[in-house]
């Protein structure tokens, strides 16, 4: 009888060891990231336009699947055509989260492909320095004085990111922007305002290319394969009875 219980106890130890070894884990580095968009400065230097846009972001990994993000930037915008001249400048901030759709063993803290959600707030000043229109009697030239406004919008941001060198990555994102308020009321929407784009559109689309520097601050062990389920207790009791039967006889 004693030999039976020793054998059964050893068997349980082997089963439990196999269960623990059945789960796979990966060491995932959580990071702080600082990124800067090079589309705005690149377009300004390449085309020699009057429009200058500079923006960047900081993100903090909450887990292997989610990160908190804060973005900000500055815009100086000028536009002219045959009958009016328009100017707008100001700052904007966006805050939200990013979700990584890659599995941890594929991402490994180096690659990211996923979706972000943002709330955007823009504080800016705009003015129409001159505009011209014709009526029944004559052509009239006038202007709209500078005014300060605040715009609100939401964004859905799909994108990808890949590591080029150790802690140095490059990535791009597409921005689907949904206007909440342009700040001028429904009858006086701005032509263009920072962070969002054309104020007369309910939906805008933008794109960013980022150069990103990351700083690991914690290593997290992530279970990529859960342990196999244990056998029901009744099955184990039955196994004991079957093992003991030859010895009781």
Image (cartoon, helix red, strand yellow):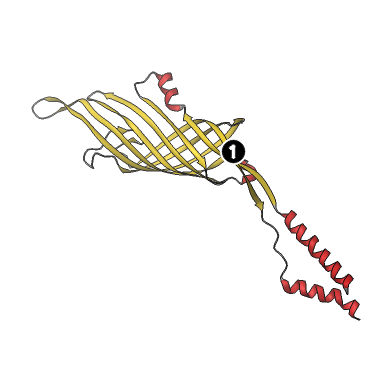
Q: Residue furthest left?
A: 137
Q: Residue furthest bottom?
A: 249
Please state which of residues 243 and 172 is positioned toward the viewer in this rendering.
243
Please state which of residues 51 and 37 is positioned toward the viewer in this rendering.
37
Residue at 47%, 29% in the rendered image: 36
Judge from the rendering whether residue 80 lies leftward or rightward of residue 71; answer left or right.
left
Judge from the rendering whether residue 141 lies leftward or rightward of residue 171; answer left or right.
left
Please state which of residues 13 and 206 is positioned toward the viewer in this rendering.
13
Residue 215 % position (x, y): 56, 34
Question: Quarter-wise, where is residue 246 in the image?
Answer: bottom right
Residue 243 % position (x, y): 85, 73
Looking at the rendering, in which quadrant would you find the N terminus? bottom right
Question: Quarter-wise, where is residue 18 in the image?
Answer: bottom right
Residue at 59%, 32% in the rendered image: 167
Residue at 52%, 35% in the rendered image: 33
Residue 30 % position (x, y): 57, 41
Residue at 41%, 41% in the rendered image: 95
Q: Which residue is mark 1?
A: 111
Judge from the rendering whether residue 53 lies leftward or rightward of residue 248; answer left or right.
left
Judge from the rendering whether residue 128 lies leftward or rightward of residue 58; answer left or right.
left
């Amino acid at each position: 009888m004693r030999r039976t219980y020793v054998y059964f106890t050893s068997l349980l130890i082997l089963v439990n060891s196999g269960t623990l070894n059945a789960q796979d884990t990966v060491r995932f580095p959580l990071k702080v990231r600082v990124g800067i968009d090079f589309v705005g400065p690149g377009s300004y230097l390449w085309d020699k336009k009057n429009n200058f846009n500079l923006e960047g972001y900081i993100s903090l990994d909450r887990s292997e699947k989610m990160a908190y993000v804060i973005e900000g930037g500055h815009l100086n915008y000028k536009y002219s055509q045959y009958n009016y001249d328009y100017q707008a400048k100001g700052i904007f901030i966006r805050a939200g989260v990013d979700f990584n759709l890659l599995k941890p063993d594929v991402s490994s803290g180096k690659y990211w492909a996923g979706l972000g959600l943002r709330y955007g707030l823009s504080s800016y000043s705009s003015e129409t320095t001159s505009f011209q229109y014709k009526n029944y009697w004559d052509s009239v030239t006038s202007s709209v004085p500078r005014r300060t406004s605040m715009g609100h919008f939401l964004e859905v941001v799909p994108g990808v990111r890949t590591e080029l060198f150790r802690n140095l990555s490059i990535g791009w994102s597409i921005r689907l922007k949904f206007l909440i308020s342009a700040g001028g009321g429904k009858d006086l929407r701005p032509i263009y305002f920072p962070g969002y784009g054309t104020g007369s559109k309910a939906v805008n689309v933008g794109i960013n290319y980022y150069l990103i520097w990351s700083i690991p601050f914690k290593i997290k062990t992530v279970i990529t394969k859960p342990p196999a389920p244990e056998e029901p207790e009744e099955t184990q009791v039955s196994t004991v009875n079957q093992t003991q039967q030859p010895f009781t006889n």
